[in-house]
């Protein structure tokens, strides 16, 4: 997708979202994405694992696919697996559809409370009460999409928290309240 096409899509999306918080159902309807299937192409940087999976089809989240995603997004420090908020998966899907780039590089998905506390004590810039520990956050980049464009797209969706870390090469996304830093 060209920058102009992306901006046009964002403009249309802005009209849909103006004056309200993100409603995933109405967002998918407005973008013509409620029918068919939703899929993700994920690469976990810390484990080297890849996954291409259809996780939603004709109104249903697919349990076996969700389990595969949970495993890929597990805490890579201790192997602990945790359910991931499907709204986060839908947000990732929406980003790939709107940007025209589909391979998501995951720097950090789920983080156990033990791992999070360790990183917090080490001064690694993690929040003490991180959404990562609830399966509601990912740190990503999208292959072929400039990091600033990813950030701008995520901000335009107003679907949760957006953190921009250009020196570390990722954008943080979560499904908490809309905020940015």
Image (cartoon, helix red, strand yellow):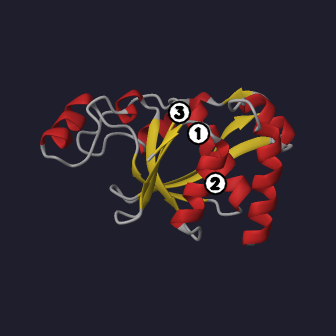
Circles 2 and 3: CB atoms closer than 8 Å: no
Which is more toward the observer, 27 or 156?
A: 156
- Cα–Cα gap, marks 2 and 1: 15 Å
Q: Earlier in the sequence, mark 2 or mark 1?
A: 1
Residue displayed at 76% across by 38% down: 17
Where residue 128 appears, as percent x and y from the top left, is 25, 32
Q: Is residue 174 left or right of residue 133?
A: right
Q: Secondary structure at mark 3?
A: loop
Circles 2 and 1: CB atoms closer than 8 Å: no
Q: Earlier in the sequence, mark 2 or mark 3?
A: 2
Location of residue 5 (image quadrant): bottom right
Q: Is residue 65 left or right of residue 31?
A: left
- Cα–Cα gap, marks 1 and 3: 10 Å
Where residue 84 appears, as percent x and y from the top left, is 49, 32
Query: How many other residues sit within 10 Å of disc 2, few (<14), some (14-19) or many (≥20)?
Result: many
Residue displayed at 60% across by 32% down: 87
Query: How many other residues sit within 10 Å of disc 1, few (<14), some (14-19) or many (≥20)?
Result: many
Which is more toward the observer, 146 or 179?
A: 179
Tell me the residue that label 1 is attached to: 89
Q: Secondary structure at mark 2?
A: helix
Badge number at residue 175 = 3
Badge number at residue 153 = 2
Q: Earlier in the sequence, mark 1 or mark 3?
A: 1
Where residue 119 appears, as percent x and y from the top left, is 19, 43
Q: Secondary structure at mark 1?
A: helix
Residue displayed at 52% across by 29% down: 177
Q: Would residue 97 be visible to someone looking at this image? A: yes
Q: Nearer the viewer, mark 1 or mark 3?
A: 3
Q: Is residue 12 above or below residue 117?
A: below
Location of residue 158 (image quadrant): top right
């Amino acid at each position: 997708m060209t920058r102009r096409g992306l901006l046009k899509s964002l403009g249309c999306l802005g009209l849909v979202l103006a004056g309200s918080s993100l409603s995933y159902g109405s967002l998918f309807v407005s973008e013509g994405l409620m029918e068919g299937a939703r899929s993700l192409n994920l690469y976990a940087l810390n484990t080297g694992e890849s996954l291409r999976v259809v996780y939603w089809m004709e109104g249903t989240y697919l349990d076996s696919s969700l389990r595969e995603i949970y495993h890929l997004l597990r805490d890579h420090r201790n192997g602990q697996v945790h359910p991931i908020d499907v709204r986060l998966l839908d947000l990732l899907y929406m980003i790939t559809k709107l940007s025209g780039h589909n391979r998501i590089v995951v720097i950090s998905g789920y983080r156990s409370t033990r791992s999070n506390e360790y990183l917090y004590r080490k001064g690694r810039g993690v929040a003490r009460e991180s959404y990562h520990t609830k399966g509601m956050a990912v740190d990503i980049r999208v292959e072929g999409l400039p990091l600033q464009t990813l950030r701008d797209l995520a901000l335009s969706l107003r679907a949760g928290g957006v953190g921009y870390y250009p020196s570390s090469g990722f954008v943080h996304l979560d499904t908490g309240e809309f905020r940015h830093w």
